[in-house]
Image (spheres, grey):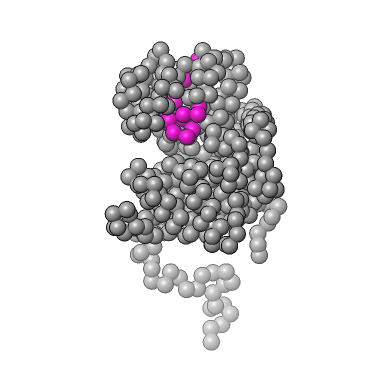
Amino acid sequence: MASAAERPAAGIERRGSGGWDSVLDTEGYRVSPGNEWRSELWRVAVTQFNQAADLLGLERDARARLLEPRRAVVSNFPIRRDSGETQSLTGYRVQHTFALGPTKGGVRYAPGVSLGECAALALWMSLKCALLGLPFGGAKGGVRCDPNRLSAAEMERVTRRFASELVPVIGPDQDIPAPDMATGEREMSWFMDTYSQHVGQATPGIVTGKPIVLGGTEGRKAATGLGATICAEAMMARLGRKVSGARVAIQGFGNVGSVIAQEMQARGASIVGLCDVTGGLVNPDGIEVEEALAWVDENRFLRGFPGAAEATRAGMLETPCEILVPAALECQITAENAGRLKCGLIVEAANGPTTPEADEILAERRIPIVPDLLANAGGVTVSYFEWAQDQQRYSWQAEEITERLRGHLEAAMDRIDESAERHDVGWREAGQAVAIARVAEAARLRSIYP
């Protein structure tokens, strides 16, 4: 028997790596937990998080607890195409933190959906909810597919099968999905019905963004676009400018971008640039939004619209304007094009459209940014209203929804403004600092179980 001096000290790993040293070294497993969701978008999210955490002097333990997602689900499942062919798809759901309550976040369908993308978006959703004072943590999910190549019947089969895969980890008091890229009221109806069939009772609170007749709320469909418009209007006022008469360029013409275009034009702005997946449109004299909407209704895309000159999606971002609104994909404003932008204000209606390297260039050029944490928060705020109404079995009127949304956004704006002045930083870092401090305090008070 070994003497006490020969025995390993308490807490020292006695088994070693079990002969896996070469694999662990070459595969990179020693870096840290979470290699599974490493991606460019995750790098952007982590960089932004650490900048704000440094500002707060956040302790290492708190960072470790708040940065990595709490749970990630990857599901491979089959669907049957209209042709009779069986196709395998991959779906994801990432739940970032439960410190503030159940998780909340959208479901997107796109060819580029990945675990890394969902992890970054779930982190941002946690911070967005914290900034707005909502009782949620963040989540995000989706299916890697091309929705433009799926029929309505195939979309239903994808949605229902994906929903059934998530039944064990979602619920109205656990994780509440919502619409996102390429999903809307129709998909949320199928999602709600699938979950309700599994649990044996109608459960409207399982998702938000539903039709009103199924427990949805007034104003949810337009909430993200309206919220971005409210933020743009408020920021222009703080800068001593007006939306009326301003030139606006919008990258994205889907659920969010089209609403922003309508709302901005209704306020007297001139829409000089639009863009969708097929390319961009530019008209210095202004694009008639209703005509563009009618064209898309008939032709599905902006491509070929006669009321403007064609441009590339990247080129449209460089259109001279007072307000630039990225409302489409992530990482669109980069170190490569940030120096060529010709705008007076950026309003981030998309999630993560600006890289940290571009942020530095824009700060040097003194171009203010309304960060996605605020500008993109209208959707989750009205989703909270919908969820609360479902829980209470009581509905609010449209005017009340709009006023509550405006109140939440303006209060968050004041929090960011105060934080920016106190720390002497830009609005992105200031907003993240407010949000991280709130989530960190909630996690500290809950302590660690067991």
Q: Is residue 72 magenta?
A: no
Task: Give the image location of residue 206, x and y in percent.
Answer: 58, 52
Report the residue at 65% width, 62% height from top: 449
Closer-to-camera residue (450/211): 211
Asked whether residue 200 appears in the rendered view, the answer is yes
Report the residue at 57% width, 69% height from top: 11
Residue 397's place in the image compared with 249, above or below, is: below
Closer-to-camera residue (170/332): 170
Task: Give the image location of residue 440, x and y in percent.
Answer: 64, 47
Closer-to-camera residue (175/193): 193
Q: Quadrant of residue 90?
A: bottom left
Q: Is residue 102 left or right of residue 191?
A: right
Report the residue at 44% width, 22% height from top: 289
Q: Is residue 38 left or right of residue 216?
A: left
Q: Is residue 252 magenta?
A: yes
Asked whether residue 166 appears in the rendered view, the answer is no
Task: Give the image location of residue 12, x and y in percent.
Answer: 54, 69
Residue 278's place in the image compared with 118, above or below, is: above
Q: Residue lying furthest bottom in this view?
A: 1
Q: Is residue 347 left or right of residue 404?
A: left
Report the residue at 55% width, 26% height from top: 229
Assign the C terminus to one quadrant of the image: bottom right
Q: Residue lying furthest front in this view?
A: 213
Task: Give the image location of residue 253, x and y in percent.
Answer: 43, 30
Magenta segment range?
Answer: 246-260
Q: How many marks?
A: 0
Closer-to-camera residue (46/172): 172
